[in-house]
Amino acid sequence: MCGIAGKFNFADNAPVPRELITRMNVAQAHRGPDGSGEYFDRGVGLAHRRLSILDVEGGRQPMTNEDSTIWIVFNGEIYNFPELRDRLEAKGHRFRSHCDTEAIVHLYEELGENCVDELRGMFAFAIWDSRTEKLFIARDRLGIKPLHYAVLGGRSLVFGSEIKAILQDEAVPRRVNFDALSEYVSLLYVPDPATMFLGVQKLPPAHTLACDRNGVHVRKYWDVRYEVNESLTEQHAAEQLFDLLKGTVKDHLLSDVPLGAFLSGGVDSSVIVGLMQQVIPGQLVTSSIGFEEEAYNELPFARQIAERFHSEHHEYVVRPDIEQMFPLIVWSFDEPFADSSAIPTYYVSKTAREHVTVALSGDGGDELFAGYQRHELEQFEHRLRRSLGPLRRLGAAARVFSNDVKFKGRNTLESITRGPDDAYARKHFLYLFTEGAKQHLMARREIHDYAAKFRDLYRTAPAKAGDWLNRALYVDLKTYLVDDILTKVDRMSMAVSLETRPPLLDHKVVEFVATLPPRLKLNGNERKYVFKKAASRLVPQEILSRKKQGFRLPIAEWLRKELRETTEDLLLGPTATQRGYFQKNELETLWRDHLSGRRDNAHQIWSLILLELWHRKYIDDPRPPTAPKTFAIAH
């Protein structure tokens, strides 16, 4: 896990200032506290911060090929690099190190831009090919590793693992992207390829970018294919899945530094820990966090799994100083990000980093195997649509009700009147601002339709996806997983210089799960059906059958109590309201209803105060962003 950045003046070969590349490197020091490197050529500068995982002594970057014509900066891990190395050495390539980065360089010599097709792992990298004067950038298939870029005036390209590195270049304008702001209000995050900065973009997962004298070209190189094998029996599917996961977890243990796992006590992390225990030599290390509030505490379940697998288990009870956490959250994400589970993710990463440098996680299980309540709800509504047929139109009356009128089943009644693509898109903001509330809240009338991307993905899912469930899961993989879950884990683990690896998101696992019949993912009301069947030989039934909890926080009470004064300033103070983004009377109603307990508006208010904090840090302050005083890099 590292940080990469750079600039290419592709129009005129103007030299890239060394002080700029140094600033970009310093801005991402937390991603790689073990070393830094820079490279310069005509019109190009590359920066790298290193977190040493493989070949601790010999893996310094930027790294080059035998004749120094190709240079790379790389963030991630390539799990099949031993096989790639053997192949490449057989073709005559000479290796100077024992790390995976060098395999990419030689693979690029052989295959050019198609090298990405051979890589198994998580990655974001940039290759400078001095022979053709081309900068080639790639991001892994699922988007585990981040990559941002900006094209400046059609003359230069600047890129970085994090936006804060890009903003070190004063040529990058800091202007609010109002379409992204509208999407954020609905989603708690900004979906790719946009960012909250106008002109700065995310390179989407499974995409490459080539930049040469002719400009910038982005292409997709991979997608999930849904070639469902209906003949696959439940038992055979569970056996195949178990064997595949066991092999994948073994591959993910590649490391020259201490390695462990996150353990929440839920199904996904318990399975990962169980599989690690089968293949890792010696005692494994697990880390968990809990809360003083019993309703939010999962430590007893995590402890049960740790005892079952005899791990060296470390626990931490979170008593967060939330006001101290705000600067860290804003700095780490670079754009507004309001998933409050970022806070416990930071603490579990911090706990793990005290003992290991690499931690495996269970991320991706819900998106692959239908683990969310929305999947079960969509199944119910899908059956209703088929049963009611033309009578669905009668339910359209639900849409005329005021946002103040609530009745049981209102959301379902409204949802079945919509097409399945639109209905599923809207499930992603079911607990945030409703469509009507957003229209009232936002002062700008040209409100961007965030749901368009979700609808398009649902409609254009690979043709063989067919079934509504596979289409829904395809949407999840392309949106919520990458822009919320993976972004959250990357930024919060990197804040403490911890590498995280999600074995469930190995693309070979994703491709296999795509062949499973939908009935093996959601079977009646049983979510993650075949995954739990496969896990049953490892994990006790009480863990498999317990209700999904996840990282939850008592935000509603924090806002009413210890954060009340801060919230009123960030939500209703003159600095915030004079921006003109939102109707002040709507903000006052939102806050008044929450304070009185009439409604729980915690998520909505949380998203708005984080937006204001971001604005003050990144837009109002003209200086390049610097780390907060409370920010500490782990070593």
Image (tube, rainbow, N blue to C red):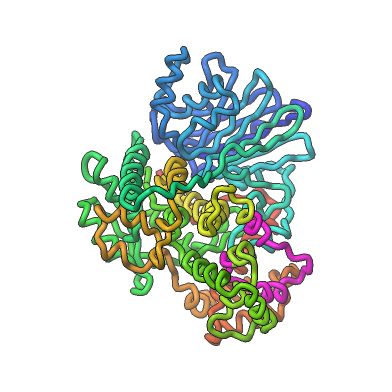
The image quarter in which residue 540 lies:
bottom left
Q: How many marks?
A: 0
Front residue of this view, candidates 27 and 7: 7
Front residue of this view, candidates 286 and 520: 520
- The x and y percentages for residue 454 are 62, 58
Question: Does residue 438 belong to the magenta stretch?
Answer: yes
* Part of the protein shown in magenta: 427-456
- The x and y percentages for residue 421 are 62, 61
Task: Classify 5 as above or below 482.
Answer: above
Task: Classify 83 as above or below 626.
Answer: above
Task: Classify 306 as above or below 41.
Answer: below
Front residue of this view, candidates 184 and 577: 184
Front residue of this view, candidates 512 and 164: 512
Query: Farthest residue toward the top?
Result: 92
The residue located at (40%, 20%) in the rendering is 86
| Residue 431 shows up from this direction | no
The image quarter in which residue 576 lies:
bottom right
| Residue 296 shows up from this direction | yes
The residue located at (48%, 40%) in the rendering is 122
The image quarter in which residue 216 lies:
top right
- The x and y percentages for residue 38 are 57, 29
Quadrant occupied by the C terminus:
top left
The residue located at (56%, 37%) in the rendering is 4
Task: Classify 468 as above or below 248.
Answer: below
- The x and y percentages for residue 147 are 59, 42
The residue located at (45%, 50%) in the rendering is 493
Q: Is residue 397 left or right of residue 495?
A: right
Q: Is residue 628 left or right of residue 174?
A: left
Question: Does residue 303 belong to the magenta stretch?
Answer: no
